[in-house]
């Protein structure tokens, strides 16, 4: 049983040693533990520092691609390296690495395939009231959309079994946290939460530049998740609003018409027709999107079979996983070279 702990990094040369020092080297039920650092196009010497600290696997991006892309590249590299369990840990030392045994225990026991670390959000002093509110709202939305009972959906401290990692896809660039849970819930992957501890942050969050930008991005992320994973529900709800407004205007027009008022109120009737038509069009879009979702499911099943058949060949060429490769970006290695580097 191999556990790989992946750490997405962006300019984390200063904090990486602190994070790595806290990682457990032995866990009951696990034969070997390896570390994987994803250098997301850092401008400092994050990759060189990781290599100097003896990190077993390093993924390097030639340019900054965002946390979601780094997370997925880490999963692919960990799977290619033979991971049975993958733990994702942020590089800001927010999460207590001592909770990793607790985090992976449900997977070892066969009770879950994805485990989310649930932070004590109400007791976390460095979280603003707005962030605490959005954390709760996001978790509630994810629970409703995924059919899971996840307590802290935005938490990045999570463990995945090999089977769960093989079935993950992230379509956004900003974050992966909400989307992966909804995917898991809708694909029948058992998801549970375990309480964890948090540390004082080593630096400000790089995902939150301002409260306003965080609110906007969070709302956009939630709406996009609804459209992708619950298209029929989303468009039914969206279409119900203009439909209801249109029917109210029709009733208003009928009241004035039967009351023999001095005006015809034709503009209200025209607006009602436009609103009702828009509502029905949104409902039709929902039906079409639901049919497209069926096709996406079939494609994901095909992708899963390919990943299981060729576990070491789907890491993208610009994301080498060999720690012995040069630290500067190079051309992609061939499949044979990647396989040789994995055996080395």
Image: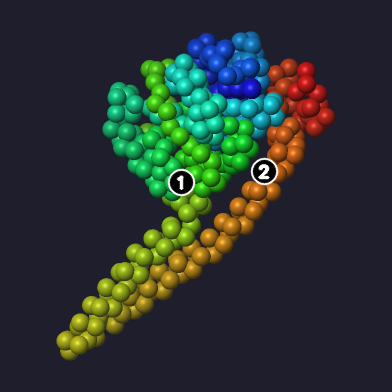
Q: Work out whether 82 lies above or below 26.
A: below
Residue 206, how many percent across, how many down?
45, 28
Residue holding disc 1:
146
- Residue at image x 53%, y 19%? 12
Q: Residue at x 74, y 20 (%)?
A: 325
User: Mark 2 = which residue?
Assistant: 304
**Alpha-carbon span between mark 2 and mark 1:** 20 Å
10 Å crowding of disc 2: few (<14), some (14-19), many (20+): some
**What secondary structure is found at the residue carrying circle 2?**
helix
Q: Quadrant of residue 130?
A: top left
* Residue nearest the viewer, comparing 123 with 61: 123
320 and 10: which one is in front?
320
Residue, far right: 336
Label 1: few (<14), some (14–19) or many (≥20) C-alpha neighbours in 10 Å: many
- Residue at horizontal 28 percent and vertical 78 percent from the top: 250
> In which quadrant will I find the C terminus?
top right
Relative placement, left or right, of 334 versus 229 is: right
**Quadrant housing the N terminus:** top right
Task: Please state the horizontal and vertical placement of residue 53, each as a whole percent of the image.
Answer: 61, 10
């Amino acid at each position: 049983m191999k556990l790989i702990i992946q750490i997405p990094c962006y300019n984390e040369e200063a904090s990486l040693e602190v994070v790595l020092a806290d990682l457990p080297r032995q866990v009951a039920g696990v034969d070997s533990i390896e570390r994987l650092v994803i250098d997301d196009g850092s401008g400092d010497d994050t990759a060189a520092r990781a290599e100097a600290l003896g990190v077993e696997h390093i993924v390097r991006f030639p340019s900054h691609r965002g946390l979601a892309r780094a997370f997925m590249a880490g999963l692919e590299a960990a799977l290619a390296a033979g991971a049975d369990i993958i733990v994702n840990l942020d590089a800001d030392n927010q999460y207590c690495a001592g909770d990793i045994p607790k985090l992976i225990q449900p997977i070892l026991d066969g009770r879950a395939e994805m485990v989310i670390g649930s932070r004590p959000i109400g007791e976390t002093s460095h979280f603003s009231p707005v962030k605490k509110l959005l954390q709760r709202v996001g978790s509630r939305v994810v629970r409703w959309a995924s059919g899971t009972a996840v307590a802290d959906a935005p938490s990045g401290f999570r463990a995945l079994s090999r089977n769960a990692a093989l079935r993950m896809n992230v379509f956004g660039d900003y974050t992966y946290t909400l989307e992966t849970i909804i995917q898991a819930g809708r694909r029948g992957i058992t998801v549970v939460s375990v309480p964890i501890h948090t540390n004082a942050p080593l630096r400000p969050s790089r995902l939150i530049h301002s409260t306003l930008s965080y609110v906007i991005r969070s709302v956009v992320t939630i709406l996009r998740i609804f459209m992708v994973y619950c298209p029929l529900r989303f468009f039914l709800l969206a279409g119900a609003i203009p439909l209801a407004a249109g029917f109210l205007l029709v009733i208003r027009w009928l009241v004035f018409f039967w009351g023999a008022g001095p005006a015809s109120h034709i503009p209200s009737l025209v607006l009602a027709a436009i609103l009702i038509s828009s509502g029905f069009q949104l409902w039709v879009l929902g039906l079409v999107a639901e049919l497209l979702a069926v096709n996406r499911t079939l494609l994901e099943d095909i992708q899963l079979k390919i990943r299981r058949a060729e576990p070491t060949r789907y890491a993208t060429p610009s994301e080498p996983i060999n720690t012995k490769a040069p630290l500067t970006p190079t051309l992609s290695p061939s499949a044979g070279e990647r396989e040789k580097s994995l055996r080395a």
